[in-house]
Image: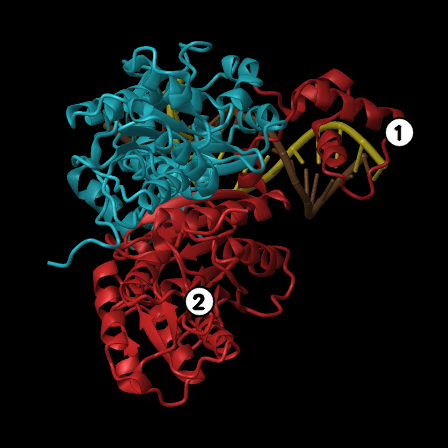
Chain colours: A red, B cyan, C brown, D yellow
Amino acid sequence: MAVTLRDIAERVGLSPAVISRVLNNRPGVWVSEDNRLRILKAADEMGYRPAAAARSLRSGCTYTVAFLLVQRPGLPGVLQAWEYGPELERLASGLAEKGYSLLVRMTGPASAGEAVSELAASRSCDALAVWGTETDLHTHADVLDSLAMPFAVKGRHESCHPHWPQVDYDHEGMMEAAVEKMRSAGRKRIAYLGFPYDETYAKGLLRGYLRATADPPEAWVSDRGETVQAAYRQVSDWMDAPSRERPTGIAIGAANAAWHGAERALHERGIRIGDGDDEVSVAGQTGTELTLWEGRGWRFTDLMPGNMGERMAAELLLPALADQPVERPVLRILPQLVPTDDPVLASDA
Amino acid sequence: MAVTLRDIAERVGLSPAVISRVLNNRPGVWVSEDNRLRILKAADEMGYRPAAAARSLRSGCTYTVAFLLVQRPGLPGVLQAWEYGPELERLASGLAEKGYSLLVRMTGPASAGEAVSELAASRSCDALAVWGTETDLHTHADVLDSLAMPFAVKGRHESCHPHWPQVDYDHEGMMEAAVEKMRSAGRKRIAYLGFPYDETYAKGLLRGYLRATADPPEAWVSDRGETVQAAYRQVSDWMDAPSRERPTGIAIGAANAAWHGAERALHERGIRIGDGDDEVSVAGQTGTELTLWEGRGWRFTDLMPGNMGERMAAELLLPALADQPVERPVLRILPQLVPTDDPVLASDA
DNA sequence: CTGAAAGCGCTTACAG
DNA sequence: CTGAAAGCGCTTACAG
C-alpha cells in the first residue's frame, strides 16, 4: 500500500497539515527542530511520495508537460522518429530538472486540434510542446491561440504567428554559412542541390542560398536532391556544362542521398569532393550517418543532439511555467559547419 | 474554465451520478432515451472531458503507462535516441488505441531503481515499460520484482529473469539466418565481424554465428567491427591470407562502419560485395542509413520501425492492464533479410 | 433504477 | 504558529 500523509502524521503524532507544510517547505512553519527531523526521517523511511493525482486535483497543477507529435504519414525529414527522438530526450531531461514530467501523445494532422483540446480540458498537463510541420499546425492555430496554458512549437512560424513561442533552425543562415564556407575556399560558382518538398524548411534553405549568391544562373538551382539517382543526374548535368558554367561548389539542402549522388557524378569524372584545386567543394545538410567514399566536405553539427528540445525546455516552457517572462519567443539555432567524417578511403595513420 | 460533471448535471437537471454513469456506459442505467441523448449532447457541446486527476484519485487507475529510459552516457547502439525513438512512438500509439497515455522518464543506471519506486509510490502510472541494457536493469531487479504493477522490459533477460515480460530481437537467430543466407549462395568459409562491446546483444549475435558455423577457425571470429579503420584492417587481414583460409562470406554483427571498412578492403583488391562468383558475400546488421559504394549485401529489415514497442504494448502491457493472462512473456523478434539498397554506383535504368 | 453521500489524498484559507 | 475542516472532481457502494 502506498504511504499517505496521514500515515506519517499518525506515526509522528502530528496533523497531516503540518506534515504537508514541512515536506513542502512552506514558510512560517514553526515546528520544533526535533519534530521537523522526525517528519523528514519518517517520510524517508516510509518511502513517502505525494500522490500525483491528489496533488494535481487539489492544486490544479500537474507538473507535467505534454509533447504532442503531429505526424503525417510518409513525411520526410525532421518528423521521422529518429529525428525527434533526441529532441524529446533533451526536452524531457530539461523539464525533469525542474520536476516536470513529459507526457507523450501522437496524433495525425486532422486530429491535432482535438488532441490539444483534450489535453487542456482533461487538465493532463500544465504546458504543451507541439512538434509538427508548419502547415499542419497552421490549420489548428485557433485552438493554440485560445489555449489557456503555456505552449511552444517546433517550427518556423515567425511570419504567420510571430507571438508563438517557437524554436527551429536558422535554415537561411545555414545555407548562407555553407556558401560562405565555400567562398572562403575560393569557390565562385556555387550551385544548390535541395529537396523537392514543399515544406517551410526546404524553402528556407533555398532562400538562404539565394540570399548568399546574388542572382545565380537558373541552372544552378536544383531540387533534385532527394535520391542518389536524381542527385547523380543533376551533378552530372552540371559537370557536363561548358567549363565556365560549371559549378565549383555545391550547397546541399538535402540529405545523404544528395551527397552520395554528387560524389558518384564527380567520381566518374575523376573529381573528388574537397576544397583542393582540382576538387569540387560541397557543404551543407546531412542525415544521421553520412560516410563519403573518398571526399571531404562540410556538414552541420548540432543538428542531431536535441538542441531544439533542450532550448524549448529551458527558454520557452520553464520560464512560462514559472510565470517569468519569455525573453525571446522566437529561437533560431545556427549550427556550426564541421568537416565530414573521414571517408572510407581515408589513408591509414 | 473547465467543464465538470456538475455543470452538465445542472444544465440537464439531473444528478452528477447519472451523468457519470451514462458517460461511462455503466450497465444498469435506466435513464430515458431522451435524457440519455440530452446528456451526451450537453457533454459534447460543452466540451466535457473528465479531469484526469480526479478520475485517477478516485478510481486508483491513471490510464497512463510510464516509459523509463535507463541510459548510460556513451552507450552505443540501441539506446541511442534515434534507435529507441521509433519504439517509443509505436509503443505510445499502441497504448493510445486503448486509451492509455505514455509518460516519459529519463534516468541513469544508478538512479533507475529510485525512479521506478518513485513512479510507483506517486501512483503516476498503471504499468511500466523499461528500456535499458541488461546489466543496468539487473542491478535493480529487486525493485522490479517487488513492483505491484504490470511491467515489461526491453532486453534479453530469459536466463536471469525468465518470468519478466520482455521483448528483444532474436540475435542468435539473426546471425544464424545471415550465415544461412550466405551458405545458400554457396559460401562455405564464413567469417564474423562484430562489435567489441561486452553487451548481451553483442554476445548473442556472436553466439548465433558460432552456433551456425560449427567450429570456425579462430581467425575468422573478429570483434573489430566498430570503426571503418578497424574493420578495414580486419578484412584486409582475411583477404591477405592463403586462399583456402580466406573467407568468402562475412556475417556482420556490427553497424555501418563495419560494412564500409569491409567494402574498402575488398575494393582495394578488386573484389565487390555480392553473391557472384568473384565477389564476397556480406550479410548482417546495419545502422539506419547504410549506403554501399558499389556492392550489394543482405541486411535485416524490421529493425527500425519500432517492432519492440508495438509488441510490448499489444502483447505484454495491454493484456496485463486488462487483467488478461500474458500468453508468452518472452518475445523474440526475428527480422527478415532483405537486399541492401542500391549502391551509389548502381547502373542507371 | 437513481439520488445523496462518502471518500480518494492532498493543500490551504480559516479559526483558534 | 497549528489543527480541523473544506474542497478539488470524480465514482460507486448504499439507501431509498
* Mark 1 Cα shell of 10 Å, populated few (<14), some (14-19), many (≥20): few
Question: Mark 1 or mark 2, which is nearer the start of the sequence?
Answer: 1
Q: Is residue B5 above or below residue A296?
A: above
Q: Is residue B229 above or below residue A187?
A: above
How far apart are the two marked residues, 2 and 1, measured between alpha carbons?
73 Å
Chain letter of the residue beneath label 2 in the structure image = A
Q: Is residue A295 above or below residue A8?
A: below
Q: Residue furthest front?
A: B242
User: How would you rate the neighbour count of disc 2 (Cα within 10 Å): few for under 14, some for 14-19, many for 20 or more?
Assistant: many
Quadrant assignment for the N terminus of chain A: top right
Dividing the picture into quarters, in which one does residue B210 lie? top left
In the figure, is residue B34 to the left or right of B307? left
Q: Is residue A117 visible?
A: no
Residue A110: numbered disc: none
Tell me the quarter of the picture where residue A22 sits. top right
Residue that label 2 marks:
A274
What residue is shown with label 1?
A32
Find numbered disc 1 in the image and state the secondary structure of the residue it sits on.
Answer: loop
Q: Secondary structure at mark 2?
A: loop
> Looking at the picture, do discs 2 and 1 lie on one chain?
yes
The residue type indicated by label 2 comes to Gly
